[in-house]
């Protein structure tokens, strides 16, 4: 696996950890790290990213045809993403803008793919 894929994997893990940390701080009052529930979700999300066989070609898990999260963890990460996504512009603006740009590119790519 190339260095580019590993860099992408690390960025994805960093992003999901930032989103979980923001969620935990705002929803659970976490001040000095993550609560136990959020720490488990963070470890799980990072483990799933480490094992993702599609890292080279995918952009975001939400666009993936294979959902590898267990149903309960999938629901938890969905809540985190819905809550933290819009708030990332205030805590991590560059990351948030990059995510929006990548999402738009991926949406266009998928639309073209579906046309063919």
Image (cartoon, grey):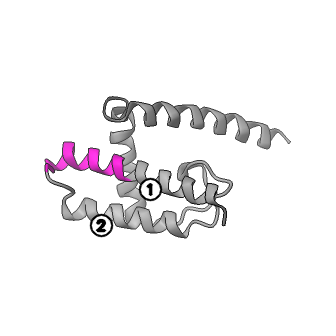
Quadrant containing the N terminus in the rendered view: bottom right
Q: Main secondary structure of the magenta part?
A: helix
Residue found at x 56% / y 53%: 8
Return the residue nearer the eye: 1 or 58: 1
Specify the farthest residue to the right: 116
Expressed as whole percent of the image width and height from the top left, the position of residue 25 reads: 20, 46
Question: Residue 70's image quarter?
Answer: bottom left
Q: For residue 30: magenta?
A: yes
Q: Is residue 87 visible?
A: yes
Bounds of the magenta segment? 17-31
Specify the farthest residue to the front: 3
Is tag 1's residue or tag 2's residue first in the polypeptide sequence?
1
Expressed as whole percent of the image width and height from the top left, the position of residue 3 reads: 62, 59
Residue found at x 30% / y 66%: 40
Q: In front of the other: label 1 or label 2?
A: 1
Residue found at x 57% / y 65%: 52
Expressed as whole percent of the image width and height from the top left, the position of residue 31 reads: 13, 49
Q: Is residue 70 visible?
A: no
Secondary structure under the numbered disc 2 in the rendered image: helix
Q: Which residue is mark 2?
A: 40
Secondary structure under the numbered disc 1 in the rendered image: helix
Q: Which residue is mark 1?
A: 13
Residue 104 versus residue 1 in the image, above or below: above
Q: For residue 80: magenta?
A: no
Q: Is residue 28 left or right of residue 116?
A: left
Quadrant containing the C terminus in the rendered view: top right
Residue found at x 23% / y 50%: 24
Expressed as whole percent of the image width and height from the top left, the position of residue 46 reads: 42, 63
Return the residue nearer the eye: 94 or 102: 94
Disc 2 crowd, CA 10 A, few/some/many (<14, 14-19, 20+): few
């Amino acid at each position: 696996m190339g260095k580019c894929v590993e860099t992408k994997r690390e960025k994805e893990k960093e992003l999901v950890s930032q989103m979980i940390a923001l969620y935990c701080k705002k929803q659970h009052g976490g001040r000095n790290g993550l609560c136990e529930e959020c720490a488990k979700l963070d470890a799980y999300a990072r483990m799933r990213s480490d094992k993702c066989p599609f890292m080279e070609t995918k952009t975001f898990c939400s666009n993936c045809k294979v959902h590898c999260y267990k149903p309960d963890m999938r629901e938890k990460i969905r809540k985190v993403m819905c809550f933290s996504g819009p708030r990332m512009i205030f805590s991590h603006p560059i990351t948030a803008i990059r995510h929006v740009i990548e999402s738009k590119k991926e949406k266009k790519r998928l639309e073209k793919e579906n046309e063919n």
